[in-house]
């Protein structure tokens, strides 16, 4: 590497004053929910580190993770890309194409072996020899393995890379798999969501750059700071849930009063994400605050846990209308009918036995 | 070597040198392009290949049609929402659901917001680097840049100091040796024509647009709860309106309406004071780069969109024009009928799918999506390491849609051509004004630059139309209408046993249609034909080429190793491959 | 008379049996089991009713959310009953170790004993009206034992595990339930699965209860031994002294 400049070097040479640098640091700290004391720590970290190369790959996906990323307000994505890290490869925005683009991957893997971050959006399909997603004439899964194998750490962006997401919904025709199914021996941070919240994405990145370590991950490999609680745990409609006040139908009076969306299928009680706290697009709203239930978009396999407007998951084999209650209710009714029939038959049998008994007794007498 | 005349009037020659660009970057999804250049480095054959497939149409089968919007929305996170809107329209059409006026207005606001956002991001972040040399900006004079900026626009961020700071930041960035996304770009390429000052100004606006785009989408966040992928609802919109009563915080209220109003005004300002002036300034340096017309001068298609009043999808109620032009007959505009099996059909002769009879096309209601990846006999490399494709066989994950057999270009340019040909002042006048400003003839529209210009004009149109619909919403609220959803036919028990429907929109990249068949309350078949399916279409049974391939033909390349010209023209379509293949 | 359980009961034929009705009684269910049984009945009743309304809440109530707690109380009742069920179950397991041999019957099935399976088939035939005469059992009849084990013991375990895992989601790390059952959250992946399983579990238990109560009443009448009163007094009364 020609120069290993630190973030601070770069930012100073960009004509940014130390004062605004420190202000940036305290904003960053605030965006990560850290106290002002951490601003110094962040400042210090940024003064002594070069910009870490990031290789951002795209598999089967819809690119909305990238779209979300560029919506970040704290920090601005402009500052992330120009000053915090070195986004050396990202086919969605990079200037180079074709050979010139592919050459970058080789160069960074070589020069920064074990030092760069692989950020993966989307996932690899395994059916058809991987040729449902082709990059440079080869299966994406090959590129994915190569780039991840030489990385320091891997970030799995969104529900695609983390869980499989929509292309992995039944019947998963391409056999798209989460990236941890094909990568081993590397720390993988899962940042699920369809897409994840912008500030969660940049928050994870700034955490790694600032503290020089992986964020604490939960049992499922997600940063605990953002995925430790359910939407429902911090939902502002929760008092209505507890009160038993629900939206019964779309656009009814209860909907206008902001009652709980549980009965119209809200999956907030089973969804781990930061929407009800961090909210979306610089805090403007989140699905529930705009009247639609959570569909559970950060959860493993959420596409197959619908229908979205039903509290309980349907059982596809039995029909979209069948919930546990319908199936259970039917079985219970059937059992009740069976019991009644059985009781009737038993009564008949008992009468027969009785008369046989009396007959036997009479004979003996 | 082998020369071939296509039925839609192009001459192909696959002799000469084969040049491969894979991955094509600064687009959505995975696209590969192969061209043959002749001895003079002029493109004589073009092969465009969608290199991804997820099978959304397969995945949708058997599901609740009310959920389909969420699945189809994930076809693409860039044109997020347009598939969802198309989907709810298709389902409403199938089930005979009428939506409230307010819902229509809000949907239009969201759809227009998408147009504004997507066009702006495309111009600055996906397309600009084809015309703007970032490295050249380093030698710009900040004062002269300021003068240039002030001469073309009243946008306030234009002082010499502003450009000096930016230049310093850019210089430091480049000197750090870590060029990030600008690494290995085609800097210094002969095809770059802007003076350093224009480059610096464009870089400034690249960054400003990056900051600003995240504001525009807040309209989606207000009504749909998030962006990307806001929420929608069959029968209306999910966000209730409560501007008077208790609990208003959970609904559309005065605060959120104010936010929407503010964003609309700022969007109008940014587009009219930054985007359009930049577009004109940049175009004025590339007037002699006249390539890339492709199909635009012969066959274009638009379904129309933005219904002024709810539930009326007929031509007179659609604010974006509807029509098909073929054979270059601007005087003969036909009406595409999405329900007529003879109008729209998809072919898979050259696509990696299997049909019972591959010479024939299928109307999407009867559409089949069954993958079949095979390479032609003349392909080079192996099944999993493709060096060159054989376009005489199957070669793309994109299907080939045709209107009455015609390959058509779709998108902002198609819409503007239809609007122009229909003499609709909203479209004709700005187009003529722009041509006049640049001192160009109408024919100049049929080009790479024409496509890029139409997109800019449309972004401005859409921003102003947002204002119209905002005012309309306020007027209805004033009149006491709060309704946002119709739930009469929400329950599947109210649905017919078997039905079908079609929904359409004009997505940022062009005409989008979803066709759904519903049996017993479940999706029996779901087919989407997407703008980039049209534009990125491979050849059909008769060998007609699609818009991407046509547009690349006859373009001279300065250096075939540096595919800047190819990128330029492809980017002018704003390709989206996740969309195209789904 | 005595009866060798190992030998298994012998089919009874009223035609050949000693017509003189004699009533023998055996102490089967010790007091703690009986007490547990009825506490458990109450807990499960509460759990099913409240659980159902957690899954499909009652029509919305009006009023100010701050002062209304309908769903809250339903859930609270569920959780209290859940604790009762769990603690009771733990106690019942303990009693399986220290109680009489019948107290162990619901915790296992002697699947390794071919004879036991034959008995299951016999009981099934009796219930299907294929066997003409019922047999006598001190503890559970083998079919009942099978049903108890699968539909009660296993299901209750499942309900407790999934129930407390969901409870832990709300209680959060640091709460004992999270320490004890947090792993289930990870195992479930998407915890919507827990709700689905838990909900099906309820219906399985309801099925069990329907059949169980019916069988108890029916056997009380039809078979040659006391049933309902057994669960009250602990004494199994045989209505005749045939083997
Ligand atoms: C016979 C035993 C039980 C039955 C029949 C039962 C039934 C139910 C049902 C039907 C639900 C609604 C599920 C849904 O639709 O989401 C539920 C939820 C729940 N149950 Fe149980 N349950 C039982 C035992 C337990 C136990 C032992 C606990 C432990 C505390 C427990 C804790 C919960 C929790 C935490 C929920 C979720 C509440 C919520 O989402 O608000 N349950 N139960
Ligand atoms: C929620 C409802 C109920 C549940 C979950 C339940 C569960 C059980 C269990 C687990 C046992 C086995 C006891 C042991 O061996 O430790 C049992 C036995 C018994 N239960 Fe229940 N029970 C319920 C309701 C009832 C009711 C309402 C009756 C009375 C009509 C009843 C009558 C009996 C009798 C007679 C036995 C002894 C059966 C035998 O000896 O085979 N149970 N019950
Ligand atoms: N092609 C396409 Fe889209 C658009 N615009 C959708 O319909 O981009 Ni992803
Ligand atoms: S996780 Fe969702 S949002 Fe992200 S790329 Fe996948 S489909 Fe798009
Ligand atoms: S709206 Fe959803 S997340 Fe919020 S309280 Fe209701 S169920 Fe929970
Ligand atoms: S649907 Fe997704 S965006 Fe948040 S509220 Fe639910 S996790
Ligand atoms: Mg399709």
Image: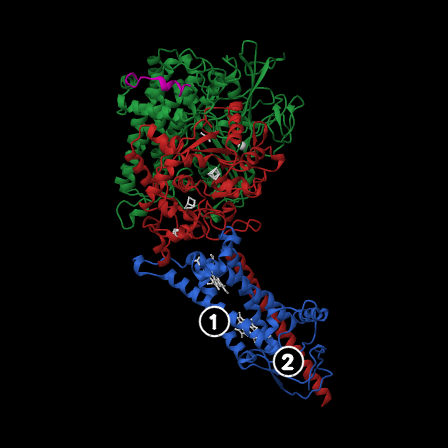
Chain colours: A red, B green, C blue
Residue B405 figure quarter: top right
Residue B166 figure quarter: top left
Residue C120 picture location, percent across and down: 68, 69
Q: Quadrant of ligand 2?
A: bottom right
Q: Is B139 part of what is drawn in magenta?
A: yes
Q: Residue furthest top?
A: B40
Q: Secondary structure at mark 1?
A: helix
Residue C171 picture location, percent across and down: 42, 58
Label 2 neighbourhood size at 10 Å, few (<14), some (14-19), many (20+)? Answer: many
Residue C22 in the figure: left or right of residue A29 = right
At x 34%, y 40%, the residue is: A28
Residue C54 figure quarter: bottom left
Task: Give the answer, above or below, for where A227 lies relative to A342.
Answer: above
Dot 1: chain letter: C
Q: Which residues are magenta?
A: B131-144
Q: Which residue is mark 1?
A: C42
Q: Which residue is mark 2?
A: C224
Given residues C13 and C57, the one toward you in this image is: C57
Q: Is B444 part of what is drawn in magenta?
A: no
- Please state, as top left, top right, bottom left or bottom right, where the C terminus of chain A lies in the image: bottom right
Question: Can residue B460 be seen in this snapshot?
Answer: no
At x 39%, y 58%, the residue is: C59
Gap between marks 1 and 2, in whole Å?
28 Å
Residue B391 picture location, percent across and down: 61, 21
Q: Secondary structure at mark 2?
A: loop
Task: Give the answer, above or below, for where C240 lies relative to B573.
Answer: below
């Amino acid at each position: 590497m020609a120069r290993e400049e630190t973030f601070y070097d770069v930012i100073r040479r960009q004509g940014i004053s130390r004062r605004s640098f420190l202000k940036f640091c305290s904003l960053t700290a605030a965006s990560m929910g850290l106290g002002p004391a951490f601003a110094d720590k962040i400042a210090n970290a940024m003064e002594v580190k070069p910009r870490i190369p990031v290789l951002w790959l795209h598999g089967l996906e819809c690119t909305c993770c990238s779209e979300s990323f560029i919506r970040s307000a704290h920090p601005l994505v402009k500052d992330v890309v120009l000053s915090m890290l070195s986004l050396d490869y990202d086919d969605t925005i990079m200037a180079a194409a074709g050979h010139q683009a592919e050459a970058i991957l080789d160069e960074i893997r070589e020069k920064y072996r074990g030092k760069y971050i692989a950020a993966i959006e989307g996932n690899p399909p395994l059916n058809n020899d991987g040729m449902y997603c082709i990059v440079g004439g080869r299966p994406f899964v090959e590129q994915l393995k190569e780039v991840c194998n030489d990385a320091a750490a891997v970030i799995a962006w969104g529900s695609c890379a983390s869980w499989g997401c929509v292309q992995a919904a039944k019947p998963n025709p391409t056999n798209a798999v989460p990236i941890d199914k094909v990568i081993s021996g590397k720390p993988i941070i899962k940042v699920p969501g369809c897409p994840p919240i912008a500030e969660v994405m940049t928050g994870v990145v700034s955490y790694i750059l600032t503290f020089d370590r992986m964020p604490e991950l939960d049992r499922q490999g997600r940063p605990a700071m953002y995925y430790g609680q359910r939407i429902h745990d911090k939902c502002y409609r929760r008092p209505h849930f507890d009160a038993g006040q629900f939206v019964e139908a779309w656009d009814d009076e209860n909907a206008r009063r902001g009652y709980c969306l549980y009965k119209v299928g809200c999956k907030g009680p089973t969804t781990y994400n930061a929407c009800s706290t961090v909210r979306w697009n610089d805090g403007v709203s989140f699905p529930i605050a705009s009247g639609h239930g959570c569909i559970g978009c950060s959860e493993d396999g959420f596409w197959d846990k619908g229908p979205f407007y039903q509290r309980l998951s349907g059982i596809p084999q039995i029909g979209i209308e069948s919930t546990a209650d319908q199936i259970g209710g039917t079985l219970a009714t059937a059992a009740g009918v069976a019991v009644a029939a059985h009781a009737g038959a038993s009564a008949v049998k008992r009468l027969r036995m009785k008369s046989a008994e009396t007959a036997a007794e009479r004979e003996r007498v | 070597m082998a020369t071939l005349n296509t039925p839609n009037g192009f001459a192909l020659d696959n002799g000469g040198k084969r040049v491969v660009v894979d991955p094509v970057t600064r687009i959505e999804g995975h696209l590969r392009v192969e061209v043959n250049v002749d001895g003079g480095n002029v493109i004589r054959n073009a092969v465009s290949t969608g290199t991804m497939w997820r099978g959304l149409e397969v995945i949708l089968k058997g599901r609740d049609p009310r959920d389909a919007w969420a699945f189809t929305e994930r076809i693409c996170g860039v044109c997020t929402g347009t598939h969802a809107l198309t989907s709810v329209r298709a389902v409403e059409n199938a089930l005979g659901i009428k939506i409230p006026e307010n819902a229509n207005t809000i949907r239009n606001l969201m759809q227009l917001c998408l147009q504004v956002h997507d066009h702006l991001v495309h111009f600055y972040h996906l397309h600009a680097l084809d015309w703007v040399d970032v490295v050249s900006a380093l030698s710009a004079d900040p004062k002269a840049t300021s003068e240039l900026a002030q001469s073309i626009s009243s946008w306030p961020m234009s002082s010499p100091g502003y450009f000096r700071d930016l230049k310093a930041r850019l210089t430091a960035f480049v000197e750090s040796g870590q060029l990030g996304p600008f690494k290995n770009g085609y800097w210094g390429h002969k095809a770059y024509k802007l003076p350093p000052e224009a480059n610096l100004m464009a870089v400034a606006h690249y960054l400003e647009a990056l900051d600003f785009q995240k504001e525009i989408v807040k309209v989606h966040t207000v009504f749909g709860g998030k962006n990307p992928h806001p929420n929608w609802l069959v029968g209306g919109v999910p966000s209730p309106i409560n501007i008077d009563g208790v609990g208003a915080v959970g609904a559309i209220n005065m605060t959120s309406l104010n936010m929407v109003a503010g964003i609309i005004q700022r969007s109008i300002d940014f587009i009219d004071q930054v985007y359009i002036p930049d577009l004109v300034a940049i175009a004025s340096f590339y007037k002699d780069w006249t390539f890339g017309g492709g199909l635009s001068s012969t066959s274009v298609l638009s379904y129309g969109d933005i219904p002024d009043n709810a539930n009326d999808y007929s031509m007179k109620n659609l604010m974006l024009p509807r029509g098909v032009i073929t054979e270059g007959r601007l005087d003969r505009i036909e009406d595409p009928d999405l329900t007529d099996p003879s109008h729209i059909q998809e072919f898979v002769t050259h696509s990696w799918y299997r049909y019972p009879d591959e010479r024939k096309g299928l109307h999407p209601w009867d559409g089949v999506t069954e993958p079949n990846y095979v390479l032609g006999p003349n392909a080079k490399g192996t099944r999993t390491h493709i060096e060159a494709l054989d376009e005489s066989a199957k070669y793309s994950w994109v299907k080939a849609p045709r209107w009455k057999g015609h390959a058509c270009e779709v998108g902002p340019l198609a819409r503007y051509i239809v609007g122009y040909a229909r003499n609709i002042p909203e479209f004709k006048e700005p187009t003529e004004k722009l041509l006049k400003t640049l001192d160009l003839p109408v024919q100049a529209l049929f080009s790479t630059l024409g496509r890029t210009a139409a997109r800019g004009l449309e972004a401005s149109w859409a921003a102003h139309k947002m204002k119209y619909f905002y005012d309309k919403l306020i007027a209805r609220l004033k009149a006491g209408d709060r309704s946002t959803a119709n739930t009469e036919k929400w329950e599947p028990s109210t649905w017919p046993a078997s039905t079908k429907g079609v929904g359409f929109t004009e997505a940022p990249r062009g005409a989008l249609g979803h066709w759904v068949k519903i049996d017993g309350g479940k999706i029996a078949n779901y087919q989407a034909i997407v703008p980039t399916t049209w534009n990125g279409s491979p050849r059909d049974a008769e060998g007609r080429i699609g818009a991407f391939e046509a547009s690349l033909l006859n373009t001279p390349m300065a250096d075939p190793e540096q595919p800047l010209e190819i990128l330029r023209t492809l980017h002018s379509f704003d390709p989206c491959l996740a969309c195209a293949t789904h | 008379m005595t009866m060798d359980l190992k030998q298994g009961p012998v089919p009874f034929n009223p035609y050949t049996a000693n017509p003189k009705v004699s009533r023998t009684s055996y102490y089967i269910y010790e007091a703690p089991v009986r007490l547990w049984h009825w506490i458990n009945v109450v807990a499960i009743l509460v759990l099913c009713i409240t659980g159902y309304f957690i899954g499909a809440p009652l029509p919305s109530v009006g009023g100010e959310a701050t002062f209304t707690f309908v769903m809250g109380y339903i859930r609270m009742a569920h959780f209290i009953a859940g604790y009762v069920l769990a603690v009771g179950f733990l106690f019942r397991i303990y009693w399986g170790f220290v109680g009489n041999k019948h107290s162990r019957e619901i915790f296992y099935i002697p699947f390794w004993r071919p004879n036991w399976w034959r008995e299951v088939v016999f009981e099934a035939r009796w219930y299907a009206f294929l066997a003409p005469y019922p047999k006598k059992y001190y503890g559970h009849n083998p079919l009942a034992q099978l049903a108890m084990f699968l539909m009660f013991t296993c299901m209750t375990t499942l309900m407790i595990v999934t129930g407390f895992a969901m409870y832990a989601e709300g209680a959060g790390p640091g709460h004992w339930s999270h320490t004890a059952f947090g792993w289930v959250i990870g195992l479930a992946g998407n915890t919507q699965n827990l709700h689905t399983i838990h909900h099906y579990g309820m219906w399985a238990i309801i099925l069990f209860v329907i059949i169980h109560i019916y069988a108890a009443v029916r056997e009380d009448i039809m078979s040659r031994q006391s049933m309902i009163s057994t669960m009250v007094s602990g004494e199994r009364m045989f209505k005749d002294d045939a083997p």
